[in-house]
């Protein structure tokens, strides 16, 4: 079975290099998000060029104060994959203004390019995120993956059961991708097999909610991303 994980934090796995290799052997493609430009550089050195890993250049809103935008700008021309970026306006996250400055800057930068794929964190900030993507032109020139939820898979399905079931039915099938956001914390002992079982659980639950087969469709959607970058 060919699978993809459109949002995973490979650098939070203890054995990142082995997880990437195992994922390749399992026919699993990873969009490996980072949270800072330095993290991107470290991961690039660690895993090198693997055909089943697309390494994202990140500027995560939780790390807003640490983001070196000059470094980000210099690296952005070297990759099509940007993530994790975005906004988090939940009350415990500060620096909302700084987050917006950084995300607007990145959206402007990416809008000037034609082949960027963005994985976007948007917690309690969806309206502002969409405004920025529209104003900058990024919504037109880039392919934006809305990574809506940053909790564990179990939390996600709890939330879905409570309130998001109807929304999941509404998403057009040609707009869906699979993601895990694993691992749940840094320095994790999780493996590539854990990613695969999480994806399989998600597929089963998604197919039950939508009452249609999903794997072939999402694989085709993912292939569409890969074809253009
Ligand atoms: Zn994430």
Image (tube, helix red, strand yellow):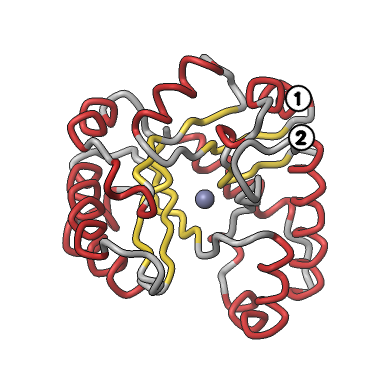
Residue 43 located left or right of residue 26: left
Residue 128 located left or right of residue 44: left
Percent x, y for residue 140? 27, 55
| Residue at the image point whose x is 60% and y is 54% from the top | 177
Query: Is residue 158 shown above or below 73?
Result: below
Label 1 residue near ligand 1, CB within 8 Å: no
Which residue position is annotated with label 2?
Answer: 191
Secondary structure, mark 2, is loop
* Pointer 2 or 1: first along the chain: 1
Secondary structure, mark 1, is helix
Q: Quadrant of the N terminus?
A: top right
Q: Nearer the viewer, mark 2 or mark 1?
A: 2
Percent x, y for residue 226? 51, 35
Of residue 119 and residue 114, the one placed in the foreground of this image is 119
Percent x, y for residue 13? 64, 34
| Residue at the image point whose x is 68% and y is 25% from the top | 15
- Badge 1: few (under 14), some or many (20 or more) residues near its Cα, within 10 Å? some
Residue 204 located left or right of residue 4: right
Q: Which mark is residue 63?
A: none
Of residue 201 and residue 13, the one placed in the foreground of this image is 13
Residue 195 located left or right of residue 49: right
| Residue at the image point whose x is 30% and y is 50% from the top | 64
Query: Is residue 123 shown above or below 115?
Result: below
- Asked if marks 2 and 1 touch (Cβ < 8 Å), the reply is yes
Which residue position is annotated with label 1?
Answer: 22
- Between the residue at mark 2 and the residue at mark 1, the CA separation in whole angstroms equals 8 Å
Percent x, y for residue 8? 59, 43
Query: Is residue 121 shown above or below 53?
Result: below
């Amino acid at each position: 079975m060919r699978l993809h994980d459109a949002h995973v934090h490979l650098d939070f796995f203890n054995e990142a290099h082995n997880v990437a290799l195992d994922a390749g052997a399992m026919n699993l493609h990873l969009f490996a998000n980072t949270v800072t430009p330095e993290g991107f550089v470290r991961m690039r050195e660690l895993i090198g060029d693997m055909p089943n890993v697309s390494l994202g250049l990140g500027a995560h809103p939780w790390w807003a104060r640490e983001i070196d935008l000059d470094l980000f700008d210099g690296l952005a021309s070297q990759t099509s994959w940007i993530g994790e970026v975005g906004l988090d306006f939940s009350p415990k996250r500060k620096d909302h203004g700084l987050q917006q400055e950084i995300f607007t800057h990145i959206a402007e930068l990416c809008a000037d390019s034609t082949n960027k794929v963005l994985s976007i964190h948007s917690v309690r900030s969806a309206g502002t995120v969409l405004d920025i993507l529209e104003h900058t032109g990024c919504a037109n020139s880039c392919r934006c993956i809305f990574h809506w939820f940053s909790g564990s898979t179990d939390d996600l399905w709890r939330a879905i059961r409570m309130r998001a079931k109807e929304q999941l039915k509404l998403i057009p099938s040609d707009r869906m991708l699979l993601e895990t956001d694993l691992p749940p914390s840094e320095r994790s002992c999780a493996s590539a097999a854990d990613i695969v079982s999480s994806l399989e659980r998600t597929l089963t639950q998604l197919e039950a909610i939508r009452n249609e087969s999903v794997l072939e469709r999402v694989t085709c959607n993912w292939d569409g991303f890969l074809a253009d970058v």
